[in-house]
Image (cartoon, rainbow, N blue to C red):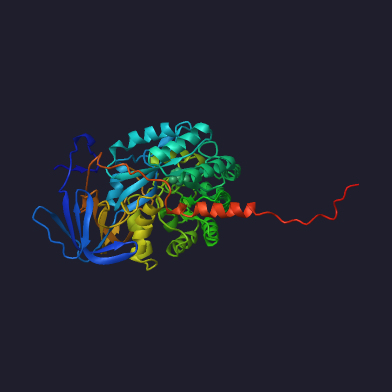
Amino acid sequence: DQFCDAGLGFDESTCGTTSSSKLLIKGGTVVNAHHQEVADVYVEDGIIIAVKPNIKVGDDVAVLDATGKYVMPGGIDPHTHLAFEFMGTQTVDDFFSGQAAALAGGTTMHIDFVIPVNGSLSAGLESYEKKAKKSCMDYGFHMAITKWDEVVSQEMEIMVKEKGINSFKFFLAYKGALMISDELLLQGLKKCKSLGALAMVHAENGDAVYEGQERMIELGITGPEGHALSRPAVLEGEATSRAIRLASFVNTPLYVVHVMSIDAMEEIARARKAGQRVIGEPVVSGLILDDSVLWDPDFVNAAKYVMSPPIRSSGHDKALQAALSTGILQLVGTDHCVFNSTQKAVGIDDFRKIPNGVNGIEERMHLVWDTMVESGQISVSDYVRITSTECARIFNIYPKKGAILAGSDADIIILNPNASFEISAKSHHTRSDTNVYDGKRGKGKVEVTISGGRIVWENDELKVVPGAGKYIEMPAFSYLFDGIGKADAQYLSSLRAPVKRSQSTNLHSS
Ligand SMILES: NC(=O)NCCC(=O)O
Ligand SMILES: [Zn+2]
Ligand SMILES: [Zn+2]
C-alpha cells in the first residue's frame, strides 16, 4: 500500500493505491439530515454495509474510535471551478490540488462547471473529462450554456440522457464573455424543463454592471473597491427576480447560485412563499465576509476578495445566515475559483481585469460548522443537510451520496466538536499563495476524512491517490420536478375552459 502526500513537491506519477478495504468506525454519534444516534459504521469496499450499535468485526478490519465525535456524510460542494480558464488566465487549483484541499477540509465530492468550447457542449465536456482524469475524489458536472442554436439544444439532450449531467448554468453577467440574453434564457429554461434538468443562474444584470464599471472608471476609481461599487446588490436583486419570474412563466425549477445579497435572498423568499420551486445557494464568502476588505490600501490583500457577485457590506452576511437557518436558502457552496496574487495583479490599475474568484473548498465545512452550529443557529442534523444531503437530493444522487446509510458510498467525516481549527495561507492545501480566510480560527475540527472507503485525511496528513476519484452521473428529474406536469395540465385545462359570452348588444349589422 502506497499513498501520496498532496503537499508541495508532490509527484503524481509515483502514486499507487490504497488502504484496507474494511473499516469500522466505533462509538461516534452518527448524524444524518433527519436523525442522529450513537452507532458503529461498518464499511467494506467503499460502501457502508451496516450502521448500528456494537458491530463486532475480525482482526482484518481497521478500527477508528469516534467516541465523543460526530460521524457525518462527507461534504458535497455544489459549486466549484477547478482548472477553469477565465478572464485570460486559469485557476491555480486543478482537479488534483483542489480536490486534495477539499478532502483535507472534509468535503468528499464536488460539482464543477463545464464551460463549452466556442459554445460546443461536447467539446467542453471532452476538455473537462481530460482535466478530471487526475481526480482523487468523486465529482460531478454542471454545464454552462453560452450560446443557442439547434446543435446546442440537441447536445443538451445528449448531456442529460447519455453523459450524466442534469443541470445547466446560465450567466446573466460577464457581458462580452459568458453572458446570455433573456431570449436565450427562455429557450434554455424550456429545454431544461423538457429534459428534467435543473436550470441554474448567475444572477446579476450584466448590461448594468458594464454601465457601473464605466461610471467607476470615469470617476477615477480603478482599485478593487470599484468592483463592489460597480455592481451593487440592486443589480443582483433585479437579475434574480427576472430569472425567477421567467422560470415561473415556464414552470420549471430554478437554482440561484452564489446568493450574495439580501436583495437576491428576498426575491427567493418571495417566490418560495408563493409556492415556486426556487433553490438558493449562498456561498461561504457571502455568509461570513464583508466588503470592507475591498478598501484595504494593500492591493494584494484587497484583490484576493474580488469575486462576482461581490462580497457585500456588513449585514448581508448575517441576513444570509438567518435565511439559511430558516430554510429560505437550502445549501452552501463555495464557488472555489482560485487565482494567486500574481494573477490578481493583472488588475492593479483597473479592477475590471482582476480575475474574479475566491477560495473555500477546504474551509467550507469548518466555517459553516463554526458560524452556524457553534453559534447555535442550526442543529447538527441541519448542518449535514446544508453541507451534503440537500445537494445530493437536488442533483438526484441521494442516498448514494449525502447519507450514512447501509448501501451509501463510504464518504464519511469524523468531526471533533471540542477541537479547534485555524486557517492559514501557509498551511492550506490549495495552490494559491493567499487565502481569504487567513487567520480565522474556530471550534470543530474534521479529524478524519474517508473517501470511497479509504482514510485520506488523518492526524493532519493527507494521503490521496490521483485517479481514485470517480465521475458521478446525475440522473434527470430530481424531486424538484415531481408534480410539475400536473400543474401544467391544470393550467392548460383552465385555459381550455370555454369562455361564456352573452351576445353583445353593441354589435349590430347595418
Ligand atoms: N464567482 C466568481 O467570481 N468566479 C467564478 C465564476 C462564477 O461563478 O461566476
Ligand atoms: Zn457565477
Ligand atoms: Zn461560480
Camera-nearest residue between 266 and 244: 244
The relative height of residue 53 versus residue 460 in the rendered view (above or below) is below
Camera-nearest residue between 51 and 136: 51
Camera-nearest residue between 153 and 422: 153
Q: Which residue is drawn at the image coordinates 54% and 36% (left, top)?
A: 176
Residue 88 lies in what quarter of the image?
Answer: top left
User: Is there any visible trace of residue 174 in the rendered image?
Assistant: yes
**Farthest-out residue, left:** 59
Residue 208 in the image: x percent, y percent?
Answer: 60, 45
Number of on-image labels:
0
Residue 54 in the image: x percent, y percent?
Answer: 16, 65
Camera-nearest residue between 421 and 238: 238
Q: Which residue is drawn at the image coordinates 50% and 38% (left, top)?
A: 178
Residue 378 lies in what quarter of the image?
Answer: bottom left
The relative height of residue 33 versus residue 336 in the rendered view (above or below) is below
Q: Which residue is drawn at the image coordinates 53% and 55% (left, top)?
A: 264
Residue 8 in the image: x percent, y percent?
Answer: 25, 41
User: Is there any visible trace of residue 356 in the rendered image?
Assistant: no
Q: Quadrant of the N terminus?
A: top left
Name the side, left or right, on which 438 lies relative to 65. right
Residue 323 in the image: x percent, y percent?
Answer: 47, 62
Q: Which residue is drawn at the image coordinates 42% and 38% (left, top)?
A: 159
**Farthest-out residue, right:** 510
